[in-house]
Image (cartoon, rainbow, N blue to C red):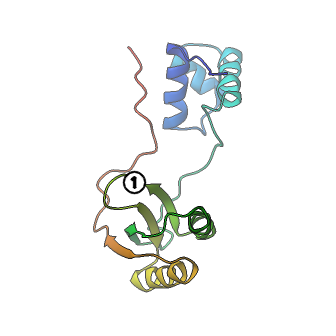
Amino acid sequence: MAVRIDEMDRKILSELQRDAGQSLDEIARQVGSSKTPVWNRIRKLREGGIVGPTTVLLDAEALGFEACFFVLIRTSEHEADWQARFLQALHERPEVMEAHRLAGDIDYILKVRVKNARAYDVFYQALISEVRIFNVTALLSMEELKFTTALPIAVDG
């Protein structure tokens, strides 16, 4: 069953994306409602799968993870057991922040966060020892120009 969302839900979602740690009272004030209806709407959005777990964003560089690599992977293997091993390897590697299967010449792209180039090499060696990969290209991000986890939810007014 799909959850239908209205303008008030969009306002609440925008507030949650901005700062999920704010109180229900503050969210209600920001969206022009009261606490109980906001709580009920958030519960409905959670139950409907629109709102997932609440987490905290950490500053990677402040914690010493100064290198961000985008890893382009081409494979000549597309069998189900290879894909299962590859997915397992990705899930077991905490350095992999994101992984996407692509259309086009590149099969997969990974966002990998590590302390430095040496740590990337340790990650790379572990990955290729677990699964056979045809070609890997690693691109070091020199500077993060924009980062957000917020979806562009349209809110009128």
Residue toward you, 151 or 39: 151
* 6 shown above or below 147: above
* 134 shown above or below 34: below
* 17 shown above or below 67: above
Spot the residue most to the front: 79
Dot 1 crowding, Cα within 10 Å, few <14, some 14–19, many 20+: few
Looking at the rendered image, the quarter that the N terminus falls into is top right
Q: Is residue 105 left or right of residue 85?
A: left
Looking at the rendered image, the quarter that the C terminus falls into is top left
Q: Is residue 62 left or right of residue 24?
A: left
Q: Residue at 71% of width from left, 19% of height from top?
A: 40
* 129 shown above or below 86: below
Q: How many marks?
A: 1
Residue type (three-letter) at the residue carrying disc 1: Leu
Q: Is residue 1 left or right of residue 139?
A: right
Q: Residue at 40% of width from left, 68% of height from top?
A: 73
Residue 100 appears in which quarter of the rendering?
A: bottom left
Percent of width and height locating residue 75: 42, 69
Secondary structure type for disc 1: loop
Residue 140 appears in which quarter of the rendering?
A: bottom left
Percent of width and height locating residue 152: 40, 32
Residue on which the image places disc 1: 102
Q: Residue at 59% of width from left, 20% of height from top?
A: 28
Percent of width and height locating residue 3: 62, 20
